[in-house]
Amino acid sequence: MLTRGVACLFIAILPLISHGQKSGKFILPSGLATADYAKGTVWVKLKKTHKSIFENQAGRIAPAVNVREIHPLVNRQSDNSARVAPRKQRIDISLYYRLTFDESKDVEQVINELYNTGYFESIEPVYTATPLLEPNDPMLGQQYALDLIKARQAWDLVEVDEDIVIGVVDAGGDLDHPDLQANIYIDPSEPLDGIDNNHDGYIDNNRGWDFSGSSLALIGTPGYIGDNDPSVNQGGLFSHGTMVAGCESA
Ligand SMILES: [Ca+2]
Ligand SMILES: [Ca+2]
Ligand SMILES: [Ca+2]
């Protein structure tokens, strides 16, 4: 049974298509491998003047389109009551469809055949999206936050620069965490020798400073300044500073 969203169509083939002629209008980008786009499917945008040709699934559809399935980008039965600001340019995404056809067919040829119908404003392959730079973190799939902050897009623009040092002001962290231990900055101007070598008022603070020291309860005690170990290992509990340092270093 046909549904409104997905139609199975085997429409009579027009002479234009059955001859398999290439119009030459569309050429796949040079250097493109077959793995770079999907077989048997393309994205199309209908011309506004032909907006309704896919709406009737009962056979009165424009016969020049020889495809197997038609998938609208958006559900036509969804609520269309959203208001648009006056004079705001609208993008009619109901014009977009993904069409599928026999995978043995040449995508470039099918695109040109579809263009020749005159119904489509634009047609393109369903390109395979691959990140340009992928971290080697074995737990990458568990880190939903990296997608939220669009880290992958950022990595495509700027690769890791290990010369950048980030200061984190937070709760202490698990400095032995697998994501952090190799990346904690050790200040070379402050060797662990019991002396404030870099004259900043803190002795041996080569990995930062822990203002809470051994206990939060001691903060505010006259003369108490904490210690030089910002590690927080609360019986294996999660430390907020560990998460923040991990996100920032990513
Ligand atoms: Ca110091
Ligand atoms: Ca020192
Ligand atoms: Ca400490």
Image (spheres, rainbow, N blue to C red):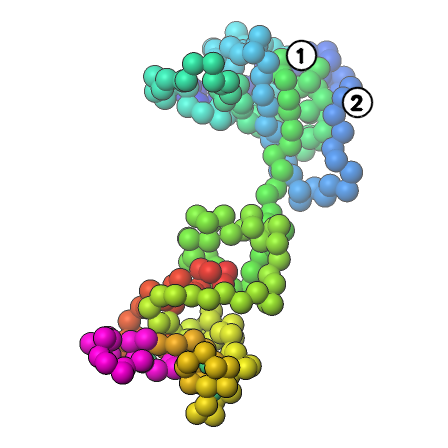
* Residue 42 pos. (x, y %): 61, 29
Q: Residue furthest bottom?
A: 193
| Mark sitting earlier along the chain (2/1) | 2
Q: CA distance from mark 2 to mark 1?
A: 14 Å
Question: Image check: 25 left or right of 216?
Answer: right
Q: Is residue 157 above or below residue 62?
A: below
Q: Is residue 70 visible?
A: no
- Snapshot quadrant of residue 9: top right
Q: Can residue 207 be seen by looking at this rendering?
A: yes
Secondary structure beneath label 2: loop
**Dividing the image into 4 quarters, which one contains the N terminus?**
top left
Q: In the rendered view, does 249 fall on the left or right side of 124?
A: left
Q: Nearer the viewer, residue 226 or 165?
A: 226
Position of residue 59 relative to residue 210, above or below, is above
Q: Which mark is residue 176?
A: none
Q: Nearer the viewer, residue 108 or 15?
A: 108
Residue 205 in picture, x, y percent from top left? 44, 81
**Which circle marks residue 118 in the picture?**
1
What residue appears at the point 41 percent right and 17 percent down from the top-left corner? Answer: 85
**Magenta residues, as a range?**
211-229
Q: Position of residue 67 (x, y in %)?
A: 59, 22
Which mark is drawn over residue 24? 2
The image quarter containing residue 64 is: top right
At 61% from the left and 34% from the top, the residue drawn is 126
Query: Which kind of residue does numbered mark 1 sit on?
Result: Gly
Q: Is residue 99 left or right of residue 146?
A: right
Above or below 246: residue 95: above
Residue 186 lies, in percent from the top left, at 51, 78
Against 29, residue 79 (above or below) is above
Asked if the magenta segment contains residue 226, the reply would be: yes
